[in-house]
Image (cartoon, coloured by chain):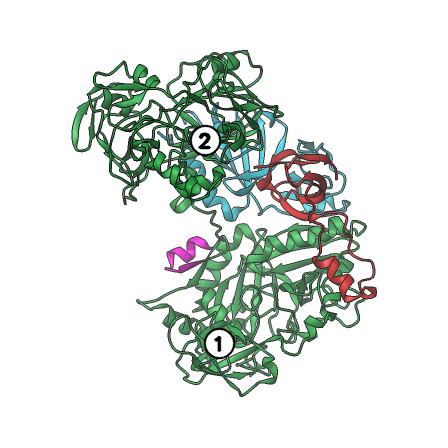
Chain colours: A red, B green, C cyan
Amino acid sequence: MLRIPCPWCGDRDEVEFAYGGEADLAYPGDPAALTDEEWAAYLFFRDNPKGLLRERWVHAHGCRRWFELERDTVTHAIHVRGR
Amino acid sequence: MRFTFAGAEYEGREGETLAAALVRHGILGGFRSVERGRPRGVYSAHEEEPNALVQVGAEPMLRATLVELRDGLVAEPLAGKGRLVAAPAPRCESMHAHCEVLVVGGGASGRAAAAAARGRVILLEQGRCAPLDGVLVLDRTVALGLYERDWVLAVERGRRLWKIRARRVVLATGAIERPPLFPGNDAPGVMLASAYEAYGRPAGATPVSGGFSPRVHLWSQAGGRLRWDERIGAPVPDGELPGVECVGRVTGAGLPDAPPFALPEGDEDEVFVDLERDVTLADLRRAVGAGLRSLEHLKRYTTIGTGSDQGKTANVNAIRAAAELLGVHPGELGTTTFRPPYVPVSFVVVAGRERGPLFDPVRTTPMHPWHVAHGAVFEDVGQWRRPRFYPRDGEDMEAAVLRECAAAREHVAIQDVSTLGKIDVQGPDALEFLNRIYTNAYDSLEVGRCRYGVMCTADGMMLDDGVVMRVGERRYVCTTTTGNAARVLDWMEEWRQTEWPELRVWLTSVTEQWAVAAVVGPDARELLAPLTRVPLDAGSFPFMAIREGEVAGIPARVCRVSFSGELAFEVWVDGRRGLELWEALASAGDATPYGTEAMHVLRAEKAYPIVGQETDGTVTPHDLGMEWVISKTKRDFVGKRSLARPDTSRADRKQLVALLPVNPDALLREGSQIVAAPNERASQGHVTSSYRSAALGRTFALALVAAGRSRYGEVVYAVPPRGEPVPAEIVEAVVYDKEGSRRDGRPAA
Amino acid sequence: MTGVRLREVALPATVTVRGEPPVAANATGPVDGGLAVWLGPDEWLVLGATEADYAHADAVVDVSASRVCFELAGADAAAVLARGCSLDLDALVPGRCAQTLLARVDVLLLRPEETTWRVLVRPSYAGYVRAWLEDALREVE
């Protein structure tokens, strides 16, 4: 049972959250300008690193805010707290 | 007190374990092993017990060394396997706790660590334990696992599951004595020397010792490293773990030197390495002879360590014996992986109080007491308990649904639709937000009007549908399907917060703020007119319009939307007055209450899709024949780009059609795969919904069929899980009132 | 669970307001005759207000029918909640609030006094939550 640090509510059990996957993937400003391959990359392809991953979480059963943090996918250690 | 073991009654003492009582009464045997049926007896004094397994009432696989006597206890010996008994299970519960320091182990080092700790301190001890000032002492409590280095699960007296979050964990778990290896080391009366002392040196018992193995399980579960300690002949904790500390004998300190190890003389098939699994030195030698070299392989081949005791008295002997057989140093073999739970735990303990009526949260609408009082049969729609049908005079579901549908199409019927998700969308950018989220455009939607809308995920697949109501200049209420209410709000918030934070729009769930009743049928106006001053004629109240007023004296918002194709009014009132509204509607005339089953049939006759029934995350609006809901003028909306991918415009995509079974009485099974001919195995789609239609006087189904819209008239086969494929003709999806002429009710006289 | 009293408490007219909250994160405080309860960095509840009172705010929604309130009072009240809530309740001192899970249901926890707790929950869950709380009040052997 991981503890996830919500920037507003503090550490809570992971069941209070929903996971949002890799961070830093903004919705493309002009989707029509992307090729099918580029669009598929945005939709489906993720880095899946063994190690540090910057990712998104939402405090679904709390304040319902989205935020980002950095987690080691091997040890689950959370290194960076952020919004 | 009295207790019963294997059918015989004995006297017991307060605070005694079952094992201690048996030994005190001279019962040094009384058990049998699982594989070879060998006579066995109590071997140890704690959780590492490999032989003395008992069933107490409904609870199987308890160790007699952990069963505390109570008056009237009845225990049966188990030969290694429990029985599921249909007996009342004990009441159990969970408990959360937080502390600064959690100490596992109530021996001398543990108590010292707990006494010296600051802040909130909890001490766990599997046996009895004296109180300690300023410390929450949980005795008869076994730790099951140490997770993430700061979360411990523990079971108190087999009834209470503790979930403990600790800033610091101190492991004072001590060591387990292991037996020496010699032929007949499993015989009744042979017991570990420490147990022999604990039981007061029982007459006829033979104490033995092969050394001590520190209880490193929790340390290892948390990721701590181990190293082989030559002196005590067992693994000990090595290195550091943030927030976790080992004290006392678990570190190896204070343990006696291990006796020198050598493979014994004599029949190796009588030398037991794992007593619970009946695995001998001969089995281990055979495994090595078969070419196995690693501990994990040896474990799997011989089953050493896989019993309910998880090899607590076996694993270290297995390492030492295997090392001898392989001619390597024991430290080179490592250990097998330690996983929770440390001792077996019953599901009933994990379930706690959430059994029976409390198993899952249940949601009910304000009208629920009326539905119950009027004999509704319910179904679970997500967490909601919704009326499925209201049987009269011993009707079965089929008869009730036919009657309810007929009432809705020929007279007037009412349904409690309060469960629909409702989201308040307000702000200067509300319109822009809706245009980005839905596939259709809302620019022309006026105040006091509503519009059906569809939303897709970014991959172009349909996510949800509903009606968007414009209730103010900058204020809308969006409805969602019942099961998707939370998901759609979460979806909308995700885009609002993470992609479009510049938009000034705010979303609020109002699902429970409003209770809603649908009044449906050609005589809907006649039912409502006496209850309201809102003009209901088609001229004053057009389709998809919203009117505010009072219904049955309750302030209400009324919308003309229809999920059945009939004339229909949805009456929205404050949730606290939902029952009052419903009672007024139910007693105003002879409206027929109808449930989800009839609702499903009515909408299916009109080919209105239900998200989650006709869709499964792989279905686009085009697949459902809803090109009209995709805006051609909006620059972008979520999903638009994906609708232009080659895959989403393939001609052979599965498309929504209706199926008319050749036999008009044959009811297709939902989920049946569709094939072109009875002996074909290539699936061309599946049946999504299937019903008996009162309006048509026959059965029909909705289905997703490859290129379905270009195959009208073709007969295909629906393959049920059992039985013969059923022939059915592909027809246009809308099987009733294709022109939509029933929407405004009876023409004015 | 000796001495813990469970009862339902009627809530006043309530709105959800958007803008700059008048209270700190996860705190409550009086506002204009009502009680403000923090829900998010741009969202709060006001117990004891109507939409008209906040017509000037970024957004306001009447949610008076959207919650019911269970009150647990007594020295062991927190221990009842601890049977289904993983929060560190010692840290939820009077005047603070928390949105969390109780028995897998979304709740808003308030603590008006040291030994008085209020659990706000959607009305549809009320039957389940009431049954759960009543069960949690019964001792387990």
Q: Secondary structure at mark 2?
A: helix
Residue B486, horizontal then vertical, whole percent: 60, 52
Q: Secondary structure at mark 1?
A: loop
In this image, B259 relative to A78: left or right?
left
Q: Chain of mark 1?
A: B
Where residue B642 appears, as percent x and y from the top left, is 72, 66
Mark on residue B79?
Answer: none
Q: Is residue C81 above or below residue B26?
A: below
Is C104 situated above or below B550? above
Which residue appears at 38% of the width and 30% of the height? C139
| Of the pair B274 and B172, the residue shown nearer to us | B274
Q: Is residue B368 magenta?
A: yes
Left or right of B426? Residue B230 is: left
Counting residues from the start of the chain, the first of labels 1 and 2 encountered is 2
Residue at 50% in and 79% down: B675
Residue type for callout 2: Ile
Quadrant of the snapshot with the N terminus of chain B: top left
Residue farthest to the left? B8
Whole-percent x, y for residue B707 in the image = 61, 80
Chain letter for mark 2, please: B
Instruction: Name the amino acid type tagged 1.
Output: Arg
Q: Which mark is residue B319?
A: 2
Asked if residue B345 lies left or right of residue B746, the reply is left
Asked whether C43 falls inside the magenta stretch, the response is: no
Mark 1 to mark 2 CA distance (whole Å)? 53 Å
Label 1 or label 2, whichever lies nearer to me, is 2
Circle 1 crowding by C-alpha within 10 Å: few under 14, some 14–19, many from 20 = few
Q: Is residue C119 visible?
A: yes
Which region is colored magenta?
Answer: B365-379
Q: Which residue is mark 1?
A: B681
Question: Is residue B280 at all visible to an observer of this figure?
Answer: no
At which x and y percent is residue B629? 69, 71
